Image (tube, grey):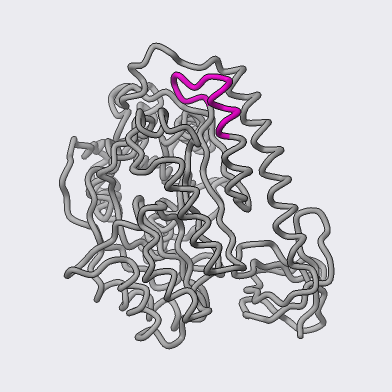
Amino acid sequence: MKFAICNLGCKVNNFEANWYAMKLKERYQQVDFKQFADIYVINSCTVTNMASSKSRQMIRKARKQNPQAVIVAVGCYVQMETGRVDAFKECDILIGSKDKIKLPQLLEQFLTDRRKINIVEKFEQTVFEEMFIKDFNQTRAYLKIQDGCNQFCGYCIIPYARGRERCLNIDSIIRQARQLTSVGHRELVLTGIHTGRWTDQGLDLADLIEKLLEEVKELERLRISSIEVTEVSDKLIDLMLKDERIARHLHIPVQTGVDRLLKLNNRPYSAEYFYQRIREIKGRVTDISISSDVIVGLPTETDADFAKTKDFIEKCELSFLHIFPYARKRVTADSALKEQVDETVKKQRVACLTNLSDRLYNKYIDGFVGKTVSVLFEKQENGIFIGHCSQYIIVKIKSETDCTNKLKDVYVDSVQGQTLWGHII
């Protein structure tokens, strides 16, 4: 039998999809989701309205490709919308954000008795479901160390979809990191829903990173997927300065530069705190890239608020942005606010910040010409090898020898578009 997986959403979903694939490959053959399969797994997302729509679309696509297929829908969209959406009529197995590790056995159960399964239940507290992955489907490997969120930002559905914070214990993280590096993954990305809140045995994220660098000898680069500005500790910055294996890139969400909106949305900092902390980090790690998330069209956001956010981002000199139009979700605090922003206005603001992000990025990467960067090459196309440097900038080189999955020092000769071009030194 053949199976296919469609993964939607974040790096945590990517990690979980890799685990599903690993377990199912023990009994079945994996094919691309576009192909005919006997089993389709849709790893769903609901963080935006577009993600929810895509989840529904992929369920319908799977059924169309094979009317007789077993269709499994799992994850955040299923957790939040089970029983409410017609698309789930196409599904044979529904699993929410709890009991995901039961997916392989539930599939076997369905194949035996052909009785539909729905194990979606409301939950807040639950244990961390460890998914030990032997190998990853890309050059850099994700390592899920945390799940859930206690923050309850006014715009965000994730605490409702994923439940409360829970963490993988440090011994299991080290064991997983050793496994992934032993099969050739040179870079690991620590990921979670609220990664900066990882804790175990009185240790915090900086302690974990220090331990990984000490005990996982084959680890060549360690990256943090995302972290809140209030969680970038001085110890973490000290470690970055001490050990170049820690990637010179931090993704620190700001969401808005307006204090009133930050407070309304339960964000744990002011605009001034964010700005001062970014200045401190850049002052110490001079070559660091700091990118950010921004939400436009938050309820009650005025034209003046948006202009203030735009000016604030320029002032912070962020390297690039991930920009999202606010998506109204029925269970979140913001959804009850009457002052919703028009969709056309949201699109205009997204376009404006996209242009700003491009300008900031071009200005940032222009400064690398004539410098040397450390690059992990991930693929090659027609003799051109493509990878990311420590600062998460795309770098390309021409080479006669295979550089795939190798870390190389590259002298940057030029910038073309949003890519650095150079040669190995």
The question of residue 291 being in magenta is answered with no
Q: Is residue 155 above or below residue 166?
A: above
Residue lying at the far top in this picture: please name it: 338
Residue lying at the far bottom in this picture: please name it: 217
On screen, residue 170 versus residue 189, left or right, reads: left
Q: Decide if residue 48 is in sight here.
A: yes
Bounds of the magenta segment: 297-309
Q: Residue 192 at x, y = what percent?
A: 36, 55
Q: Residue 128 at x, y = what percent?
A: 22, 57
- Residue closest to the eye, 130 or 322: 322
The question of residue 301 being in magenta is answered with yes
Q: Residue 367 at x, y = what percent?
A: 74, 63
| Label tally | 0
Q: Residue 364 at x, y = what percent?
A: 70, 57
**Residue at the spot x=32%, y=62% of the render?**
145
**Residue at the spot x=59%, y=68% of the render?**
286
Indicate the quadrant containing the C terminus: top left, top right, bottom left or bottom right: bottom right
- Residue closest to the eye, 50 or 119: 50
Q: Is residue 182 above or below residue 375?
A: below
Indicate the quadrant containing the N terminus: top left, top right, bottom left or bottom right: bottom left
- Residue 363 occupies which quadrant of the picture? bottom right
**Residue at the spot x=40%, y=52% of the render?**
228
- Residue closest to the eye, 238 or 60: 238
Q: Decide if residue 39 is in sight here.
A: no
- Residue 17 occupies which quadrant of the picture? bottom left
- Residue 158 occupies which quadrant of the picture? top left
- Residue closest to the eye, 125 or 276: 276
